[in-house]
Amino acid sequence: YIEASTTPCAINLHLLDRIPTVTANYVEVGRALLNLAANSMDAIEGQDTPGVIDIELRTDEEHVVLAFRDNGGGIEPERLELDEEGVPIFVGNTTKGIEAGEGFGTKQVYSTFRSDHIQVKSELGKYTEWTISLEKSSAEKSTVLSKLEARYHQLIEVDKFSIAAESPSDQ
């Protein structure tokens, strides 16, 4: 998405060595990261300064922390206020005006990571930063998931065998 954009933008990726494993749906996480990138590119478009997106992956004691920051137009302070569910008011509502966007991308990000794992900071005209905390996988959880994955693959093979056995033979 970023490569196809006509908005000039530098991307800085900061990764620490040996980031622990997290348990997450990689398709949903990938979609959420794409939504964050798309929103950043839209926020950067039309700004007077060259666009910059900083993506950082670091750890704290219990979490892997993903920070996603752009130097776009920012979000108005009143739209950062939390609703009764602890979600900023801008989530699910476009910040792009009537010309683009419907707010679905931010809803998907919150659906993927949950509001208690997300913090959004912004200063109008300067930046927006999303900080997402992902729970580190324990060795026990990784072992259980590995066993479940192995069992799933066994079931798929049994299902394939059953389907092949039930297929009419070539005549």
Image (spheres, grey):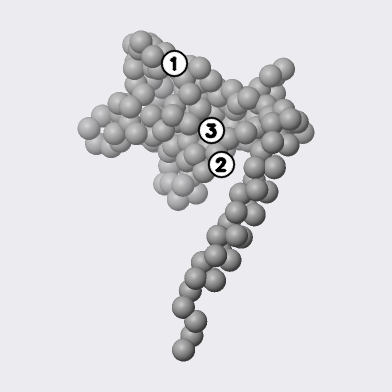
Of tags 3 and 2, which is closer to the observer? 2
Q: Are marks 3 and 2 in contact (CB under 8 Å)?
A: no
Label 3 to label 1: alpha-carbon separation: 15 Å
Residue depicted at x 58% and y 35%? 24
Nearer to me, 23 or 55: 23
Along the line of sight, which residue is nearer the eye, 109 or 96? 109
Q: Viewed as shown, does residue 70 lie left or right of 63?
A: left
Mark 2 lies on residue? 26
* Residue type at tag 2: Tyr
Q: Secondary structure at mark 1?
A: strand
Q: Residue at x 42, y 13 (%)?
A: 86
Spatial separation of the CA atoms under disc 1 and disc 2: 30 Å
Q: Which one is earlier in the sequence, the residue at label 1 or at label 2?
A: 2
Give the residue at x 40% y 25%.
73
Badge 3 density bin: few <14, some 14–19, many ≥20, Cα 10 Å? many
* Number of on-image labels: 3
Label 3, on which residue? Answer: 53
Quick one: label 3 or label 2, which is nearer the N terminus?
Answer: 2
Residue 30, position as x, y percentages in the image: 52, 41
Residue receiving disc 1: 123
Q: Secondary structure at mark 3?
A: strand
